Image (tube, rainbow, N blue to C red):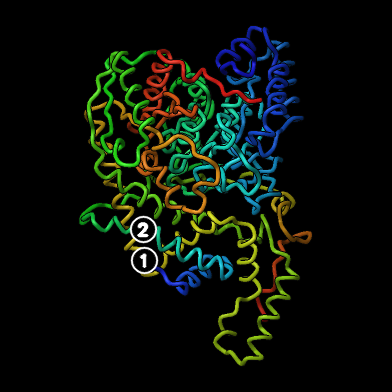
Amino acid sequence: MSLSQDDVKKVSLLARLLLTEEELTTMTGQMSDIVGYVEQLNELDTTGVEPMAHAVEQFNVFAADERAPSLSRDEALANAPKRDDECFRVPAVLGE
Amino acid sequence: MSLIHASAAQLLTQLESGEITSVELTKACLAQIDAADKQVGAFLKVMRDSALEQAESVDARRKKGEKLGRLAGVPVAIKDLLCTQGETTTCASKMLENFVPPYDATVIAKLKAADAVLIGKTNMDEFAMGGSTENSALGVTRNPWDLKCVPGGSSGGAAACLAASMAPLSIGTDTGGSIRQPASFCGVVGLKPTYGVVSRFGLIAFASSLDQIGPMARTAEDAAILLEAIAGYDPHDSTSANVKTPAYSQSVKQPLKGLRLGVVKEHFGEGLDSEVEQATREAIHVYKSLGATVSDVSLPHSKYGIAVYYIIAPSEASSNLARFDGAHYGHRTDEAAMLEQLAQERAALEAAGDEAGLAKLDTSLVRMYRQSRAEGFGPEVKRRIMLGTYTLSAGYYDAYYLKALKVRRLIRQDYDAAFKNVDLVIGPTAPTPSFAAGTKTDDPLSMYLGDLYTVTANLAGIGGISIPCGFSKSGLPIGLQLQGPPLAEERLLQAAHMFQTATDWHERRPELS
């Protein structure tokens, strides 16, 4: 299946990536190639095959409901691109 | 034998007997890094001061007769995607160029508890996505055997630093072959353990159902020693295997009697380089001479491995990498410039009376995310995020992702059937030896096909090891791959050690000027 540049543009918003026109063009070609390649899976009949999401059997692991030490506020904020004394700072979300 | 070429096993003996000190050894490794790493570029960061402090502390405690950890005083290099408290951990990405983790990954904590000397952080493909280390945004790594060639990837720095004798041990990670393929390209040993054997806590995730941390070394015995130090159940990783860690360092030297090897038919088909094929066939012959029985096995669905992998891995990556949004850590775009640009776009749309365009215009927060990610991620990472977002998006989930999960089970069933008749399967690690830098960067699909023999182990969750088994005429190393049933790491290591008792490929070293 071949992807259109418009498809790729839509995906770029879902993926929260801003692509230049040039990147969109390259990406459209490369994604079409790769999607075309993976479509060979359609030659296999997988009726009745249980999907395998994980390599090992997964069990629920419950943690004890106990208080334990966690990062201090300063440690948690240490890598913030922008912060004040208490919070991460981001551009305004409301009021646009 | 000089300190930098010695195995970790030899070094541990010499350290314990007092013949050498950790400071001498660490200084020797640092001197080799100074001499050779300008050409090789294995390290993103050399932890010179903290390594020497750690070495001094080990020597002092040894002098006092204190009980020390099992890697006491031996330098270990770390792939730069394991969180290391107080040390930048970059994933070779501009996104995390200045990220300083507030905690240690479990593997790092275990290495520290084992009194290893952490000597530095090694280069890799950005976020472990790639097979040549050319996708690193922060440095160039070359193959010590031929500086025009790539070291493989994504654990390219981890493999190159071993080949160039800069460290005796290193830690890699493997999502589709990222330990075994660079080991093969650089002529060293790399083990991808069964999924769950080593805790992934603190590993910056690429594809969580496939990622596994493993040991890299110059001998199978050293890989066993390192695996023993890092393996084990971890309550912080709910997917880690709750099994007792075997004494790999002890069992590795016991030869396997009556070893049954299965030659994977599908791994000797189209695309296999003739020199790699010849070296692999000769290696199989070595096993026969050591008493192994050899038969053919078939993994009929293995040819679909790359297709399955390039649906599942990008899907998981698109989800895992959603966290890098410039809000809490990592790169954030210049906000003032971003807001200015957005205002200009809005003004232009308003002037044109384009209501539809205005309705679609990003909010400033969304634009902050998109712009930060556009600047922070390199082309391969963007490509995989895009692919994964596409295959998981509405309307395509069943056609791609669900289909891939079903074929994944068929791949696992092939292995289960094969291991009813053989103890391990054997074949080449990669279809070719290393290649010249720059020759595959424009064609992602051809790069992806280099993972053909390795990805299926990740999809099935089983272990695999690459060991040196020869050289091409142009002097590039060739790797032999063994894969085993779940939790058969002891057997893999024993089989690898047996081979190394009968061959000397692993003892050769590149000549670096």
**Left or right: residue B294 compared with residue B146:** left
**Left or right: residue B132 compared with residue B393:** right
Residue at 31 percent across and 27 percent down: it is B424
Residue at 38 percent across and 60 percent down: it is A35
Q: Residues within 10 Å of mark 2 (few under 14, many from 20)?
A: many
Q: Quadrant of residue B8?
A: top right
Residue lying at the far front of the rendered structure: B473
Q: Residues within 10 Å of mark 1 (few under 14, many from 20)?
A: few
Do the residues at discs 1 and 2 belong to one chain?
yes
Residue that carries the numbered disc 1 in the rendered image? B396
Quadrant of the rendering where the C terminus of chain A is positioned? bottom right
Q: Position of residue A85 (x, y in %)?
A: 79, 59
Please name the amino acid that badge 1 sits on.
Answer: Tyr
Q: Are marks 1 and 2 in contact (CB under 8 Å)?
A: yes
**Left or right: residue B100 compared with residue B414:** right
- Disc 2 element: helix
- Disc 1 element: loop
Q: Nearer the viewer, residue B216 or B151?
A: B151
Residue at 57 percent across and 65 percent down: it is A17
Q: Relative to B287, does residue B124 appear above or below in the rendering? A: below
Q: Is residue B216 visible?
A: yes
Q: Relative to B29, does residue B315 appear above or below in the rendering? A: below
Q: Position of residue B13 (x, y in %)?
A: 59, 10
Please name the amino acid that badge 2 sits on.
Answer: Tyr
Q: Relative to A61, does residue B472 appear above or below in the rendering? A: above
Residue that carries the numbered disc 2 in the rendered image? B401
**Left or right: residue B4 compared with residue B231:** right
Q: Chain of mark 1?
A: B
Q: Is residue A56 visible?
A: no
Q: Nearer the viewer, residue B146 or B393?
A: B146
Q: Position of residue B280 (x, y in %)?
A: 35, 27
